[in-house]
Structure formats: structure tokens, C-alpha cells
Image: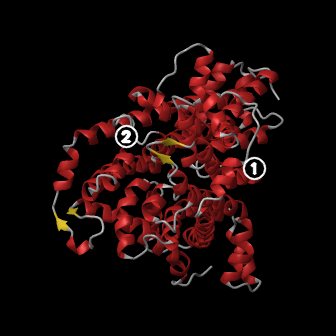
Amino acid sequence: MNRSVFPRCLHYAALVVLAALCVAPIAIIFATSLRQQVDIFAEPLNFIFAPTLENYRAVLEEERFSRYLANSLIVGLASTAITLLLGCMAAYGLARFRFRGRATVAYVTLLLRTVPLAVLAIPVFMIWNAWHLVDSLAGLVLLYVAVNLPFTIWLLYGFVLQVPVELEEAAAIDGCGPVRVFVKVILPLMAPGLAAASIFTFRIAWNEFILALVLSGRQTRTLPVAASLYITDIGVDWGRVMAMGGLIAIPPLIFTFVAARQIITGLTAGAVKG
Amino acid sequence: MRTPSWAPVLYLGPAVVVMAAACLYPVISAFQLGLHDWSMGTPWSEARWTGLDNFVSAFSNARVWSSLWTTLLFAAVCVSAEMALGIALALALERPVRGTAVFRTLFILPMMIAPVAVGLVWRYIFDAQFGPVNAALALLRIAPVAWLAEPALAFIAIVVADIWQWTPFVFIMMVAAVANVDAAVIEAARLDGARWWQLTFRVKLPMISHVIAITLMMRLIDAFRVLEVVYVLTFGGPGDSTEILALHIYKTAFVGQQLGVAAAISVLLLVVVAVLSWGALRLSNPLKADR
């Protein structure tokens, strides 16, 4: 390797500072959630304190917390599963077949990827009312599948293209039907893409807040909506709200540590070939 | 392989139906709703056709224009800061070192966290009474600053939160782009005696200019879509100093109960984003990139 402008120790120092900047606010979430209200008021910069699980206990004992948690899990997992299934089928169809209307489907899908959720909120509220989907988990799942499909299809499309058609033809000659070719040949080769797509979809469905706020009722709230209700005009109970924020942050944090490589693949797919 | 004509329908049908019903149809309905006067909780059949009235009242409202201006300023400041920081850091730190994977993992954490949590923690950090920023200022004997109560400072707060969350994205894109540059080209330039600034500005940057352009478009589009972090961090306040267009639409619809007007404004936002998307598509068309 060649000399760089930076000596090695400076390089590391810079990386450590940047990493600290990225992690600090997340650390503050958890640190604040472990402090007593009096401590939070008294000395914000005192990092040596007796941690307490009091805030978590209070949040978990909230009347409907387990309901909200279950809602979030159901919505997150169902949206992810359905998006992946429909997404990989559509990506395969788009990559392998030439048919009338293919370009239209492709471009409309691309454009739908960038629709602001604020634009969707109003008409979706109206339509879901007519379809009796307001205040139902199914309504949220349908919406999250729809908003996640465009990205998923385009991410997986790139992966299908990398699978040589000859491989499929060979399998077909060996007597595999189209469904078996898809399941046995294509799906395994798309595995990294599927991992990235599932993390991105789950992240949106689990974290999303505005649409869930508009469409959910007392029984169908998800965790982010419940967290937002801790902010009132009278003030914020920082300990509890951070405990809630911390709980919401845990699944995405786990995914990040387990599958950082796949996430980066998903982020850079399309723009950077490699 | 011979494909039967029903095959595309079978593979694409379900996804197309879901996207059409729950994404495309709502977008089209936004236009339709913009032409009507409809109140929440009443059946759509009672909606009154009002022609362009909603659009006229939206575009003659000074708050819509100030909100558009806030959005443009927010997008311009955030995205240029993120691009500049991300590119500079990527060029300085592109060389793989031991532990690179660990650092990259830490760098993507900010974008994975729920926007609600991001908004909350920055609201806490900038809190006038209990926030760490003011506590740190107190150590320097500087009087506490009411960050979220001053229009200019509140705007800085939402910008800082966005920069914190999305600079790592630019950084990761740029590192991947630089890593993709043919090492032989760099080596050749070096053998020809290129200095580091020549390598950077004459070789590396031009070779990743395409990725820079795409990343810029992606960031711009997303900057116009920001809503949740600002909702939690300032809710547009103080006054309307941080009321970006997406939030203005939300407030007009669900606080002010003017669904038709809100739909008309959302058409404006949709047009801005569609133009940017069209630009992004011109730069990088995945359909044409078929290998």
C-alpha cells in the first residue's frame, strides 16, 4: 500500500472521533433512560450515576404497552414477509420477461419510491376510511407493503440480473419446472439482496410514525406512536420517553450489528457497481 | 426460454396490484382531493367540487411560500453540508485499515434508528433546561441558550439532526465509489508524479463524479421528504420557523382540518420531488443499466 496523506495514528483518531459522534446521541438515549428523573434535572453532564431500571419498569407497566409492542411486531414482521415475497416475484418478472407495459411498470415503480409520506397521509386516510381499514393493523401492513415494494423490487432486480440465464436454462433442461427453478436456483443467489431488503423494510415498518399516527386508534397504536404521546405541552418526562426510544431502537441496533455488510450493500446498490 | 404470456402477470401481478391500490391510487387521489371540499368523517359522496379554489387559496397563502422557502433552505444547507463532509471524510479515510468493518457498522447506526427517537434525543440535547449542550456551555460560563425557542437556532437544531443522521450515508457511498476506482489508474497517475491534490481533484473526484451526482439527488429527494424528525424535534416552531413543507401539509390536514387545501399543497411537494426523481432517473437508469 502507498503512503497516504495521513499517518496511521491520525487516521485512527479521525475514525474514532467520527464513530463517537455517530454513537453519542444513541448513547444519550440509553444513558438518560437509565437515570432517575431527579438526576436528569440536576446534572445533565454527570455520567457517573447509579443506573436504575425504574423508567423501563414504568413504561412496561403502562396499561397497553404489551398491546403496542405486539402491534409493532405484527406490523413489522407481516409487512416484511409480504413485501419480500411479492418483491422477489416482481423483481424476477421484471428482469426476465419482456412484455408489453414493462417499461411503464418499471418507471412508475421507480417514481413511487420517492413519494413523500406526507403526501400519502391525506388520501390514504380518506381511502382507508372508505375501505374500513382505519384503526386496523391490516391497513398499516397494506400501506407499508406498498411503500416498501418499489425499493425492494429495484434492489432485488439488480440481484436477479447477476444470475446468468444459462443457469436457469440448465436447471430447466434437467427437468425443473419454472417454480422450482425460481426457488432452487434464483432465490439462493438473491440471498444477500433478500437480507438487505428485509432489513430495510422492517426498519421502515417498525420505525414509521406519521402514517401510523394518522391511521391507528387506541388499540392499534404502534410503539413510535405511543412514544410520541409522551411529549405533551406541559413538558417531557425525559426518563420515560428515552426508555421508550431505547426500546424502539433495540431491534434496528441488533440488525445493524448482525448484518452491517448487507445494509451497506443495500445502501450502495444501484449507485455503485461492485 | 419460451415464456408463456401469463408468466409476467403471475410474477408481477400481486406486487403491481398492491402498489397500484395503496400507493399510486392515493397519489392520484391527492390531485382529486385537491379539487374538492371534503371534511373528515363524512362520506366522500358529500364532498363538494370546488375546482381550483383549494389551489388558489394554497398558493395565495404566505405561510405556504414561507414553508416552501424553509424547505428549500433546509434541503440546501443539509445536503451541501452532508455532501461536503461526506466526500472530504471519504477521501481522507478511504484507505482500509484494521477495524474498518467495526467503524462502518457504527457509522450506519444513525440512519437505522427510528426518526421518533432521533427527534427525541436531539430535542433533549438542545433542551434549554436539562440539555447537555447548555450544560456544556455552563461549564464555559456561557449563559443558557433557548435553542428551540429562537427561530434561527431551532432551524440550526433540525439541520444538525439531519446532518448527524445522513452524513454517514454520503460517506459510505463515497468510500464505496472510491474503492471501485481502478487502482491501476491511481497508480499510473502516481507514477507520473501526481501530487495528492492532483490525485484527488484531477483523478479520484472526476472518476466518482457519477456516484456523487446520484448521491446528491438521493439526498435532495430525501431532504424534501423529511417530516418525522422535525415533527418530534420542534413541530415546526417556534412560530413557523422550522415548518418544512411536509409538516405544513400534515398540520393543514390534521390540525387545521383543511384536507382539500392540504392536498393541493401536497401536489406542489409532489411536483418538486417528481422533478428531482426525473433528474435522478436521467443520471442513473436501472432499466438501461442491464448488463
**Location of the C terminus of chain B (image quadrant):** bottom right
Pinpoint residue A49: horizontal percent, then vertical percent. 75, 34
Q: SS for tag 2? A: loop
The answer to which of A104 and A7 lies nearer the viewer is: A7
B193 shown above or below A226? above
Query: Which chain contains the residue that carries disc 1?
Result: A
Choose between B20 and B182: the one closer to the eye: B20
Q: Nearer the viewer, mark 1 or mark 2?
A: 2
Residue shown at 66% from the left, 82% from the top? A178
> What is the C-alpha distance between the residues marked 1 and 2?
35 Å
Residue B180 tag number: none
In the structure shown, which secondary structural element does the residue marked by tag 1 occupy?
helix
Residue matched to label 2: B243
> In which quadrant of the rendered image does the N terminus of chain B lie?
bottom right
Residue type pointed to by label 1: Phe
On screen, residue B272 versus residue A21, left or right, reads: left
Q: Residue at x 63, y 70 (%)?
A: A81
Vertical relation: A189 (above or below) B204:
below
Residue picked out by circle 1 = A257
**Residue B276 in the figure: left or right of residue A259:** left
User: Contact (CB < 8 A) between labels 1 and 2?
Assistant: no
Q: Residue at x 70, y 42 (%)?
A: A34
Please tell me which residue lies in front, A80 or B99. A80
Where does the image place residue B68, in percent across and percent down from the top left?
32, 40
State the image coordinates of residue B25 (x, y, percent, origin top left): 37, 68
Q: Does residue B74 appear anywhere in the picture?
A: yes
